């Protein structure tokens, strides 16, 4: 990264687009786990800019909000409850 780009980057609190390692760090994961979540659809697929894979933080935020919350029942149905 050039000195000019580095100077601008230090002034930005957050960029709109993130590389894979940065996107993983953004949600508090390692790159391997983040990649697995992308593959299984729980995290968004990247956008492409001339072959570079870039994740949009808005897409990541939306996917993160859809993850289950500990102690809450997913989709309003308790899988351990008998419907008798």
Image: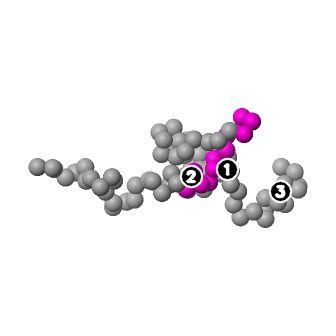
Q: Give the label on residue 6, or none.
A: 3
Q: Residue 4 location in percent, x, y? A: 88, 56
Element at badge 3?
Answer: helix
Q: Residue at the location (52% across, 54% down)?
A: 62
Residue 21 vs 50, above or below: the answer is: below
Q: Secondary structure at mark 2?
A: helix
The magenta span reads 49-61
Which residue matches tag 2? Answer: 60
- Image point 63% across, 50% down: which residue? 56
Horizontal and vertical percent position of residue 78: 25, 53
Q: Which mark is residue 18?
A: 1
State the separation of the CA atoms marked 3 and 1.
Answer: 15 Å
Q: Is residue 21 visible?
A: no
Counting labels gives 3
Picture layout, residue 20 above or below residue 72: above
Residues at discs 1 and 2 in contact (Cβ within 8 Å): yes
């Amino acid at each position: 990264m050039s000195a000019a780009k580095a100077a601008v980057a230090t002034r930005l609190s957050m960029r709109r687009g993130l590389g894979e390692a940065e996107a993983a760090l953004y949600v508090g994961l390692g790159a391997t786990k983040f990649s697995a979540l992308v593959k299984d659809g729980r995290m968004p697929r990247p956008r492409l800019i001339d072959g570079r894979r870039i994740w949009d933080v808005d897409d990541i935020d939306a996917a993160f909000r859809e993850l289950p919350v500990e102690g809450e029942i997913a989709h309003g149905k308790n899988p351990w409850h008998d419907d008798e």
